[in-house]
Image: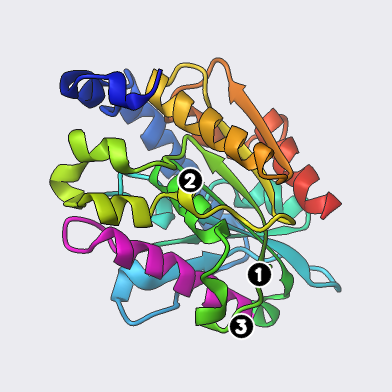
Amino acid sequence: MTWKTLSKDELRREYEIVVPGVEKINAQLQNDSARVAAGLPGQHDLAYGEGGERHMLDIFTVESSAPSAMLVFVHGGYWKVNSKNARRFPAKPFVENNIAWAPVNYRLAPGFSMDEMVEDGRNAIAWLYRNAENYNCDPNRIYVSGNSAGGHMVGMLCADGWQSQYGLPKDVIKGGCALSGLFDLEPLLYADPNEWLKMDVETAQRNSPIYTLPSSNTKMIITCGGEESDEFRRQSSDYAGLLESSGIDVRYFEMESDNHFSIIGKLGDSASPLFSAIVKMIEET
């Protein structure tokens, strides 16, 4: 069954994210992020563009003699809310594994379009590539991760074909990990998010990762929570299947006991399968 067999009411329900206790989860992540930011070496609010706060990123660096890999993180929030500041919490375990953590902001809807948000993500990658060595990072070992809307951005950043326009090597991103991502935006045309995204069919298709896959040498991890809606789980499994059928090295798994928000916290848990999978991907590339 595809999304096209669902009624508009069913689509609205599938893409309406309702999780009991989400306020508590978000508060914990914000508190953990504040604690990590206060106690871990890093550079905050670095400008990669001219858009003020929404064009800023952080880099939590590895203190070592050799440049480290870098894991960029793009936050979720259905493209209209949230900030990198609440996604600083995973920095500690990743830095302890010799991986710099770089959460980024981007402009949000409804003030800015999907095209502009994707452009922001690509500009952030370009800035990080050109400035990596200033923060003891290897520009040839950049990876990207993100959840929900950020998972969509992972797909668009790992997609092939845009890099030369930004003066970047084809393989500037070596691997990606998308949590609860959205890879086909067309169903959203009939759900609540398009009230602020204001996409038409052409915009949705142009910005859907299913139509522009990564190059064959990009490693990918696709995951979602087992307690998420059928459509969110389908989006991840379908995209992973498409990657696999195209010869891309992809690992797909569901975090059975997690929902759309609790899964984010697993990024900061060094004992979680998600954390282990990301570290393994980076170490083996």
Residue 147 located within the stretch drawn in magenta: no
Q: Which residues are magenta?
A: 106-131
Q: Residue at x 16, y 52 (%)?
A: 198
Q: Does the image show residue 272? A: no
Q: Where does the C terminus fall, quadrant-wise?
A: bottom right
Q: Which residue is mark 2?
A: 210
Q: Which image quadrant is residue 17 in?
A: top left
Amino acid on which disc 1 is placed:
Val
Q: Which residue is mark 3?
A: 130
Q: Which residue is mark 1?
A: 172
Which is nearer the N-term, disc 1 or disc 3? 3
Is the Cβ of the residue at disc 1 closer than 8 Å to that at disc 3?
no
Examine the rendered structure and indicate whether residue 266 appears above or below residue 255. Answer: below
Q: Which image quadrant is residue 67 in?
A: bottom right
Examine the rendered structure and indicate whether residue 17 appears above or below residue 148. Answer: above
- Who is closer to the viewer here, 138 or 197? 197
Residue 130 located within the stretch drawn in magenta: yes
Question: Which label lies toward us, 1 or 2?
Answer: 2
Element carrying mark 1: loop
Q: Where does the N terminus fall, quadrant-wise?
A: top left
Characterize the local packing of mark 2: few (<14), some (14-19) or many (20 or more) Cα atoms within 10 angstroms: many
Secondary structure mostly seen in the magenta stretch: helix
Which is nearer the N-term, disc 3 or disc 2? 3
Q: Residue at x 19, y 44 (%)?
A: 194
Amino acid on which disc 2 is placed:
Ile
Amino acid on which disc 3 is placed:
Arg
Examine the rendered structure and indicate whether residue 45 appears above or below residue 34. Answer: below
